[in-house]
């Protein structure tokens, strides 16, 4: 396959690359709110519960993180990593209070915050989940990295859906007659 110009070939109109509209994405990241991403339903346990209660809830709902609440407000987050690092690794019993092994004061976003703000907070802290809370600190959802990725794919469908399975491999000869 040659990339040299062919004088017999009809000139093709200039088109932007598939799905590449950085100005539109940049604007949407600033304008669209977190609520546009439809965060997952908040799943929570009470801070007075035990790690065993949290693990049972995570298994029941098939999720990897739980919000920890006290008097209806988010005071922490309990993740699979917290279970491994703060409970199992030190050899603590599962009846340890979840308050002792949660990540306290998690970084949160408001439903009115921009998608850009949420992405920056996730990136800065290396978080896969962000609690979405209202003005009073009550949980209204959980924003996952998966939801953010789906949002980004909406802006680049041509590019994402037309990727070859192995983008670095090229056929030795062109296909067809």
Image: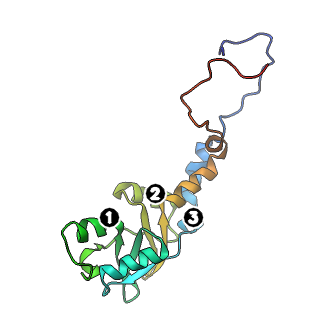
Q: In x, y percent, where is residue 41? A: 52, 75
View extreme (top): residue: 7
Q: Are marks 2 and 3 in contact (CB under 8 Å)?
A: no
| Cα–Cα gap, marks 1 and 2 | 21 Å
Q: Earlier in the sequence, mark 1 or mark 2?
A: 1
Q: Nearer the viewer, residue 20 or 47?
A: 47
- The quadrant in which residue 17 appears is top right
The residue carrying mark 3 is 37
Left or right of residue 31, residue 120 in this image? left
Q: Say what secondary structure mark 1 lies in.
A: helix
Question: Whole-percent x and y of residue 40?
Answer: 53, 71
Q: Which residue is denoted by mark 1 in the rendering?
A: 81
Write down the residue under mark 2. 119
Position of residue 2 relative to residue 103, above or below, is above
Compared with 4, 94 (above or below) is below
Tell me which residue sits at (67%, 42%) in the image.
158
Label 2: state its secondary structure. helix
Which residue is located at x 70 percent, y 12 percent? Answer: 5
Which residue occupies the foreground of this view, 25 or 53?
Answer: 53
Which SS class for mark 3? helix
In the rendered image, residue 157, in percent from the top left (x then y), is placed at: 65, 46
Answer whether residue 8 is visible to the viewer in this image. Answer: yes
* Image quadrant assignment for residue 171: top right
Q: Earlier in the sequence, mark 2 or mark 3?
A: 3
Q: Are marks 1 and 2 in contact (CB under 8 Å)?
A: no
Crowdedness near tag 3: few (<14), some (14–19) or many (≥20) residues, C-alpha within 10 Å: some
Outermost residue to the bottom: 71
């Amino acid at each position: 396959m040659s990339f040299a110009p062919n004088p017999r070939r009809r000139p093709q109109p200039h088109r932007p690359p598939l799905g590449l509209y950085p100005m539109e994405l940049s604007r949407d990241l600033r304008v669209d709110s977190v609520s546009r991403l439809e965060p997952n339903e908040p799943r929570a346990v009470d801070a007075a519960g035990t790690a065993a209660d949290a693990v049972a809830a995570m298994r029941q709902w098939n999720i990897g993180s739980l919000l920890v609440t006290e008097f209806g407000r988010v005071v922490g987050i309990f993740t699979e990593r917290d279970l491994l690092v703060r409970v199992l690794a030190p050899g603590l019993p599962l009846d340890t209070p979840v308050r002792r092994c949660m990540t306290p004061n998690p970084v949160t976003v408001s439903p009115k915050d921009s998608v850009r703000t949420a992405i920056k907070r996730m990136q800065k802290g290396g978080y896969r989940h962000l609690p979405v809370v209202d003005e009073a600190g009550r949980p209204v959802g959980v924003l996952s990295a998966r939801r953010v990725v789906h949002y980004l794919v909406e802006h680049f469908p041509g590019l994402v859906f037309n990727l070859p399975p192995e983008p670095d491999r090229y056929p030795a000869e062109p296909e067809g007659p």
